[in-house]
Structures are given as structure tokens and as C-alpha cells.
Image: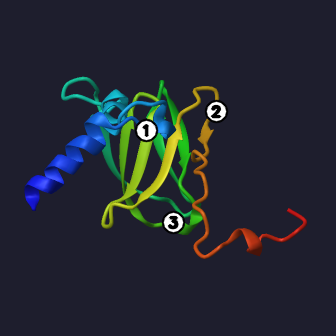
Amino acid sequence: MNQQLEHFQELYNEHRPHRAINRSTPGEAYRSLPKDEPRLRHGDEHWRVRYDTVDNVGTITIRYAGRLRHLGIGRAHAGTPVILLMNGPQTLVTARHTGELLAEHIIDPGRDYQPRKRQKPLPKEGLHVNDVPEHL
């Protein structure tokens, strides 16, 4: 039984051209795609790590390019202990106890206050095309 499955798999992936992928085989299509790999290699980048607590207005303060910068985290996280990871102008702020990503920033040297990077909203669960109001 395994030999039959292996034979079918070989035919399907390596010998049978497919219309949807320009007459190439699934195996050729798979091998032609770029493969995911780590973006940073050991020694390529220098990350600063800092432990802090979000202040009562929802920010933490860092020194960047010789000046103090205020990173917006959000008032909902006031008092939250955080870990700040910083590589050049890029920052990641995570909750210290849960590891939840709270904010990302790309520091603009021309501004003191740095708003969070806007995240694309996740699709709402259970929302179907028929549920969208007509005026949208």
C-alpha cells in the first residue's frame, strides 16, 4: 500500500504538469518559491534590551540620537512592566510577564513623541460578505 501511495505522490508532484501553475509540476512550483529563513544572523545586529514600566500616561522614555524620546504604548497599559528591544530606529515593546507584543515603533529623529506603528486590523470572526451593511 505504501508503494502505491509513494508512486502516486511521485507522479502527482514531479511528472504531471498543472494548468493553474503554468504547466509546471507542483514540485517545480514549490522549489521555485523563496524559502523562509531567519532574517538576522548571530552577530549581524546589535539589540539593546531595557526593562521598564509604562508610565501613567501610557508612554516610556528612551534616549535616541542624543535626545529623549517618548514611545507611545497606550494608556490601557499604564503601570505594565515591559521589555524594550531596540535595534537602531526600530523598537519592540513586550509585556514582561506575558510576552505580549504591546507596541512597535520606527523612531523619527525629528519628533519627540513616537506613536505606535499602526497594525492592520485582524478580520472579525464570523463576519460574512452578507453581513456587511449596504452603505459600505
Q: The residue tagged with tag 3: helix, strand or loop?
A: loop
Q: Identify which amino acid the numbered label 2 is placed on.
A: Arg
Residue 110 versus residue 74 in the image, above or below = above
Q: Nearer the viewer, mark 1 or mark 3?
A: 1
Give whichever of 111, 86 is nearer the camera.
86
Position of the C terminus, as image quadrant, is bottom right
Q: Earlier in the sequence, mark 2 or mark 3?
A: 3
- Mark 1 and mark 3: span between their CA atoms? 55 Å
Residue behind mark 1: 18
User: Tag 1: Cα neighbours inside 10 Å, few (<14), some, or many (≥20)?
Assistant: some
Q: Is residue 136 left or right of residue 118?
A: right
Residue 18 position within the rendered picture, expressed as x and y whole percent measured from the top left = 43, 38
The residue drawn where x is 59% and y is 30% is 108
Residue 71 makes an appearance in the image = yes
- Mark 1 and mark 2: span between their CA atoms? 53 Å
Q: Quadrant of residue 69?
A: top right
Residue 6 position within the rendered picture, expressed as x and y whole percent measured from the top left = 15, 50
Residue 118 position within the rendered picture, expressed as x and y whole percent measured from the top left = 61, 48
Q: Nearer the viewer, mark 1 or mark 2?
A: 1
The residue drawn where x is 61% and y is 69% is 124
Residue 8 versus residue 14 in the image, above or below = below
Q: Identify which amino acid the numbered label 3 is placed on.
A: Ala
Residue behind mark 2: 111
- Mark 2 and mark 3: span between their CA atoms? 22 Å
User: Tag 2: Cα neighbours inside 10 Å, few (<14), some, or many (≥20)?
Assistant: few
Count how many numbered circles sit on residues in the image: 3
Q: Identify which amino acid the numbered label 1 is placed on.
A: His
Residue 134 versus residue 18 in the image, above or below = below
